[in-house]
Amino acid sequence: MLVRKTEQGGAPVLTPRLFMLREGDRLYAGEKITGAYTLDPVKPDDAVVFLATGTGEAPHNYMLWELLRRGHRGPILSACCVRYARDLAYLATHDELMRRHPHYAYLSRTTREAADEGRKVYIQDLITSGRLEEKLGRPLDPGRTHVYLCGNPKMIGVPEKDRETGARAYPRPPGVIELLEGRGFRADQANIKFKGTIHFEEYW
């Protein structure tokens, strides 16, 4: 998909270049993760939680494999919510990783099939129900847990600054950021270069 304008009105740098590639063209991807959405803040014993919708799971998989490769000691949980079970492209891989690494857990849910809980289940539901903490094996402690969010902006729920009051206003319905900030977490804020323990990457 070609993105012609950013939300700020400027021209995007990456997507036009990708859009122009043809079959057989070369694309170079470096081994080092750079940018703001990285594992840099994570300490070896921290709990790490990856929450994604759809294809937002892909960058989390790379980060997960990097944590396992370097011997991360803290618990790791990856949860992905998709429309249909057939969209869970990495299920077999996650099953194998759980078999090899006892401190890793994977949780998948669907929104168009009601098989999981007898109803549609969203990422936000995993937090409010306590299912996420149950699967992680410890409480969501904002002092020792990093949460990564990637995918649908409605799931993430990035707050905006109210033009009249200057206060941060959360979108409706509540996203993960609001739920976690209510528990003492703080989200990254690029505009003031603040690094919290909630890191996010919106896919559109």
Image (cartoon, grey):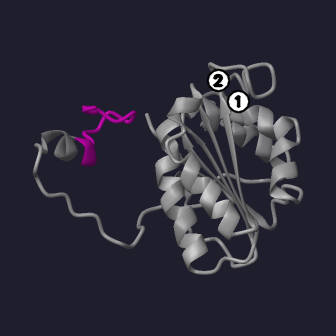
Task: Answer above or below: position of 197 versus 179.
Answer: below
The magenta segment is 1-15
Does 195 lie within the magenta span?
Answer: no
Q: Crowdedness of circle 2 by 10 Å Cα count: few (<14), some, many (20+)? A: some
Instruction: Say how many tags the image has.
Output: 2
Dot 2 corresponds to which residue? Answer: 111
Dot 1 corresponds to which residue? Answer: 122
Q: Amino acid at mark 2?
A: Thr
Dominant secondary-structure state across the stretch colored magenta: loop
Task: Answer above or below: position of 118 versus 4.
Answer: above
Q: Is residue 97 left or right of residue 20?
A: right
Q: Position of residue 177 (x, y in %)?
A: 70, 42
Image quadrant where residue 170 sits: top right
Does 2 lie within the magenta span?
Answer: yes
Tag 1–tag 2 contact (CB < 8 Å): yes
Task: Answer above or below: position of 178 versus 26.
Answer: above
SS at circle 1: loop
SS at circle 2: loop
Q: What residue lies at 86% left-to-right and 59% top-to-bottom? A: 137
